[in-house]
Image (cartoon, rainbow, N blue to C red):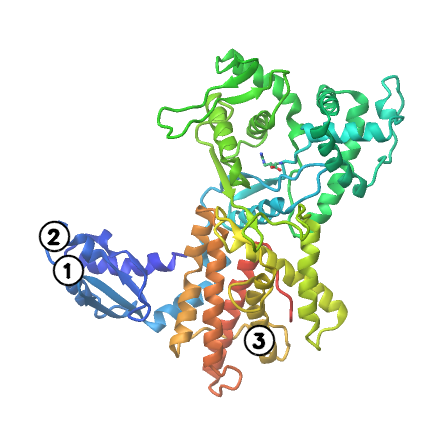
């Protein structure tokens, strides 16, 4: 289906043309003065120069052409040259009836879906997930679902950090604690044990201990470096131990991501591309792009138009070790080899911007991907505490993601359990569901690049711009629909059809619904989940105004009542779809 604004713009364009002006001038937008009109067109202002005419005269000519319009019930030229427009109720309801029947509410699908690899999550093996990883997971999951809804082919890849110094540190610490393990015995030729020599809880404690020791003890640090190197070079025992670290850690990660309703198609790590590195590096050298500088191997990536200095991209350190950039480059080349993606999108903290600038430039310069492949980095801001500083635990430590999730679950359980109709089991389930909405909406409703304040009281409130408020609205609609239909299924029955709006609030709700496709399209193109949040917040507000101004179930005029029920059905479907692409769901009651 054509987007609503495009459709009504065509009517204005026809009028401009009919009055002897350029068609292009007829672009209609949502009014920024809703007190005066619903939609507006500023084309007369833009055309004044070309036609050497006062804009108001042009606007008047066009308004005259729109007098018998089937789209606009009123078109008024106002000084200095705006066109104020109001829609015909029948036209709007006709569009909504089409929308209700159409697949995805009439959102146009791409002729050829883009193939996209989305790199998000990015947890580090053996380190507990912390809140910094929360944003990547939450935003990435939404971006994936938005792109899929938009009809694109998306492969989500977690890109675990499983190959760097942290692995050497963990291995070193284990070797100190359990030096007799067969993994450390070079003469050991047998099979390695099935069971890991540590639990996940131990693992979570091992890394911080090792990291701390390495900072205080140079010999310890050197040993960790050596172990990292040995691991990367393929030492049999260390590889086997490393495998166990990954197994235990990934199992735990999966639990965390499941709690967030986040999932990945690929569980690649930095290590996945280890064998790709030597070939990639020699080609970079052969082609004359990579050269030695102070012992390290680098590629120049500065461009004459740079306004700040972009240092060369280091490919290998002086000891020949691979870096974060190296594995990212090798991953790009492997993704190209296996998937030929049209786009690669990375969701990370915005402080990694320089890293991605260097990596992208190197990848292009060295021809790791074809020219047409888009490389995009979506950098997000920091999640801060109420003090405006990066979010910490009460005693100032790094907050584990699992603790944060249980905090918000606890808070929500108290609220939900206060509803006497809900038993303990349902309360538990519902609390988790609403808490997830609170957490995700609290994050996604901000433009990703901005920092935001994690405010558990605000996020869990049932009022205001929050996830629970959206869910509350959905639950309200479900309950009305359930009361209406004897079947009590919380859906609008087939026979109900949307008719023309009877009131201002109803018309506002209807125009919101008509804007769905345009909103979804821009959320996809701009990689902007916050647009969906803003949309459903407005939609919920307008729904609630309509609800408070209308006695729906006691209406005696069956036609009117059925029309409202159908309108509720569409509102419910649109809201449910939107929260689905944002990555959460609504309960039956709360
Ligand atoms: N593991 C990294 C971190 O914790 C994030 C990885 C992001 N993805 C990438 N391809 N570099 O910061």
- Along the viewing direction, whichever of 456 and 248 lies nearer the viewer: 456
Mark 1 vs 2, N-terminal side: 2
User: Relative to residue 332, is residue 88 drawn left or right?
Assistant: left
Q: Residue at x 57, y 73 (%)?
A: 476
**In the rendered view of the protein, which quadrant contains the C terminus?**
bottom right
Total labels drawn:
3
Q: Quadrant of the N terminus?
A: bottom left
Residue at the outermost front position: 216
For the residues marked 2 and 3, what is the alpha-carbon distance in whole angstroms?
55 Å
Q: Is residue 204 above or below residue 192?
A: below
Q: Which residue position is annotated with label 3?
A: 481
Quick check: 51 left or right of 146?
Answer: left
Point out residue 62 in the picture as x, y percentages from the top left corner. 18, 62
Q: Mark 2 and 3 residues: CB-CB less than 8 Å, in contact?
A: no
Around disc 3, counting alpha carbons within 10 Å, would you say few (fewer than 14), some (14 to 19), or many (20 or more)? many
Among numbered discs 2 and 3, the one appearing first in the sequence: 2
Quickly name the residue at label 1: 58
User: In this view of the protein, can residue 52 be seen by the observer?
Assistant: yes
Residue lying at the far bottom in this picture: please name it: 556
Classify 545 as above or below 84: below
Q: Nearer the viewer, mark 2 or mark 3?
A: 2
Q: Is residue 581 visible?
A: no
Residue at 48 percent across and 12 percent down: it is 288
Q: Which x, y percent locates residue 17?
A: 19, 56
Q: Position of residue 549 (x, y in %)?
A: 45, 80
User: Ligand 1 shows up in which quadrant of the image?
Assistant: top right
Q: Are marks 1 and 2 in contact (CB under 8 Å)?
A: yes
- Which residue is denoted by mark 2 in the rendering? 51
Q: Is mark 3 within 8 Å of ligand 1?
A: no
Q: Nearer the viewer, mark 3 or mark 1?
A: 1
Residue at x 57% of width, y 46% of height: 140
């Amino acid at each position: 289906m054509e987007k609503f604004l495009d459709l009504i713009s065509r009517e204005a364009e026809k009028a401009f043309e009919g009055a002897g002006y350029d068609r292009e001038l007829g672009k209609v937008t949502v009014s920024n003065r809703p007190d005066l009109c619903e939609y507006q067109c500023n084309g007369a202002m833009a055309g004044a120069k070309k036609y050497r005419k006062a804009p108001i005269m042009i606007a008047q000519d066009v308004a005259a052409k729109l007098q018998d319009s089937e789209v606009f019930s009123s078109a008024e030229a106002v000084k200095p040259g705006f066109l104020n427009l109001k829609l015909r109720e029948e036209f709007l309801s006709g569009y909504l009836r089409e929308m209700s029947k159409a697949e995805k509410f009439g959102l146009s699908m791409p002729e050829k879906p883009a193939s996209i690899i989305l790199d998000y999550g990015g947890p580090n093996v053996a380190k507990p997930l912390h809140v910094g990883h929360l944003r990547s997971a939450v935003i990435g999951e939404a971006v994936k679902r938005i792109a899929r809804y938009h009809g694109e082919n998306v492969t989500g890849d977690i890109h675990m950090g499983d190959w760097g110094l942290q692995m050497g540190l963990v291995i070193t610490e284990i070797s100190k604690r359990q030096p007799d393990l067969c993994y450390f015995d070079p003469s050991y030729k047998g099979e390695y044990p099935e069971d890991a020599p540590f639990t996940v809880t131990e693992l979570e404690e091992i890394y911080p201990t090792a990291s701390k020791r390495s900072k205080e003890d140079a010999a310890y640090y050197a040993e960790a470096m050596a172990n990292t190197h040995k691991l990367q070079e393929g030492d049999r025992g260390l590889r086997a131990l490393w495998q166990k670290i990954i197994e235990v850690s990934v199992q735990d990660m999966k639990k965390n991501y499941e709690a967030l309703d986040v999932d990945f198609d690929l569980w690649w790590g930095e290590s996945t591309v280890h064998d790709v590195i030597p070939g990639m590096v020699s080609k970079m050298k052969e082609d004359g792009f990579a050269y030695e500088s102070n012992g390290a191997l680098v590629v120049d990536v500065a461009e004459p138009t740079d306004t700040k200095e972009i240092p060369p991209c280091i490919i290998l350190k002086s000891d020949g070790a691979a870096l974060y950039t190296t594995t990212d480059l090798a991953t790009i080349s492997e993704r190209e080899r296996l998937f030929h993606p049209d786009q690669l999108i990375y969701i990370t903290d915005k402080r990694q911007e320089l890293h991605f600038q260097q990596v992208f430039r190197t990848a292009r310069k060295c021809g790791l991907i074809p020219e047409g492949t888009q490389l995009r980095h979506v950098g997000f801001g920091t999640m801060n505490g109420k003090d405006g500083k990066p979010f910490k635990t009460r005693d100032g430590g790094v907050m584990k993601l699992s603790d944060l999730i249980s905090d918000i679950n606890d808070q929500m359980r108290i609220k939900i359990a206060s509803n006497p109709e809900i038993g303990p089991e349902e309360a538990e389930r519902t609390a988790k569901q609403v808490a997830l909405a609170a957490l995700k909406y609290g994050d996604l409703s901000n433009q990703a690049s901005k920092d935001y304040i994690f405010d558990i009281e605000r996020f869990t409130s049932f009022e205001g711009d929050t996830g629970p408020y959206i869910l509350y609205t959905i639950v309200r609609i479900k309950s009305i629909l359930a009361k209406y239909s004897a079947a009590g299924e919380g859906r609008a029955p087939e026979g109900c059809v949307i008719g023309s709006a009877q009131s201002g609030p109803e018309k506002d709700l209807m125009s919101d619904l008509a804007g769905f496709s345009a909103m979804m399209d821009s959320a996809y193109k701009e990689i902007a989940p916050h647009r969906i949040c803003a949309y459903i917040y407005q939609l919920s507000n307008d729904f609630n105004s309509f609800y408070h101004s209308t006695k729906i179930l006691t209406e005696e005029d069956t036609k009117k009542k059925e029309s409202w029920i159908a309108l509720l059905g569409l509102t419910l479907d649109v809201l449910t779809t939107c929260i689905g692409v944002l990555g959460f769901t609504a309960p039956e009651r709360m």
